[in-house]
């Protein structure tokens, strides 16, 4: 599996923690994740796959390690 990454821009500049549906599946964004994006708007997070429960439809992801390097 290729490692997926996401930026705040690709996440639609969400402003509230929560669970959001994207083309790749469900993404849970925490308040701490948003704090990083607010301080480093160009940060790129690695998507971390979570085990899906049987009553959950689609893939589940959280945000993992991030890179705050400026864009090249």
Image (cartoon, rainbow, N blue to C red):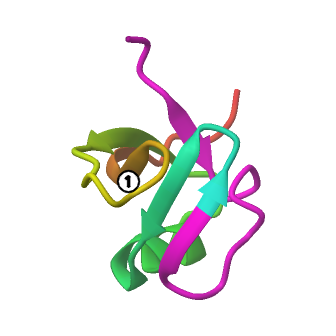
Determine which quarter of the picture holds residue 32. bottom left
Q: Residue at x 51, y 40 (%)?
A: 69
Say whether residue 31 is magenta. Answer: no
Under circle 1, the secondary element is strand
Q: Relative to 4, say whether 6 is above or below.
A: below
Magenta residues: mostly which secondary structure?
A: loop
Considering the image in quadrants, where does the N terminus appear?
top left
Image side of residue 59 versus residue 11, left or right:
left
Residue indicated by mark 1: 63
Q: Relative to 49, say whether 19 is above or below.
A: below
Say whether residue 6 is magenta. Answer: yes
Q: Residue at x 65, y 85 (%)?
A: 15
Residue 53 % position (x, y): 25, 55
Residue neighbourhood size for the residue with mark 1, other residues' Cα within 10 Å, grouped as few (<14), some (14–19), many (≥20): some
User: Which of the pair 59/27 is nearer the observer?
Assistant: 59
Residue 7 % position (x, y): 63, 49
Residue 38 % position (x, y): 58, 77
Count how many numbered circles sit on residues in the image.
Answer: 1
Image side of residue 40 versus residue 67, left or right:
right
User: Which of the pair 13/58 is nearer the observer?
Assistant: 58
Determine which quarter of the picture holds residue 14. bottom right
Residue 21 % position (x, y): 63, 59
Q: Residue at x 36, y 55 (%)?
A: 62
Residue extending farthest to the top is: 1
Image side of residue 7 versus residue 19, left or right:
right
Image side of residue 29 versus residue 21, left or right:
left
Which region is colored magenta?
1-20
Considering the image in quadrants, where does the C terminus appear?
top right
Q: Residue at x 59, y 67 (%)?
A: 20
């Amino acid at each position: 599996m290729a490692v997926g990454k996401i930026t705040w821009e690709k996440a639609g500049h969400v402003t509230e923690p929560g669970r959001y549906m994207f083309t790749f599946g469900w993404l849970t964004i925490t308040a701490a994740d948003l704090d990083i994006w607010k301080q480093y708007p160009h940060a790129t997070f690695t998507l971390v796959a979570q085990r899906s429960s049987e009553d959950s439809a689609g893939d589940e992801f959280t945000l993992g390690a991030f890179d705050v390097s400026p864009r090249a």
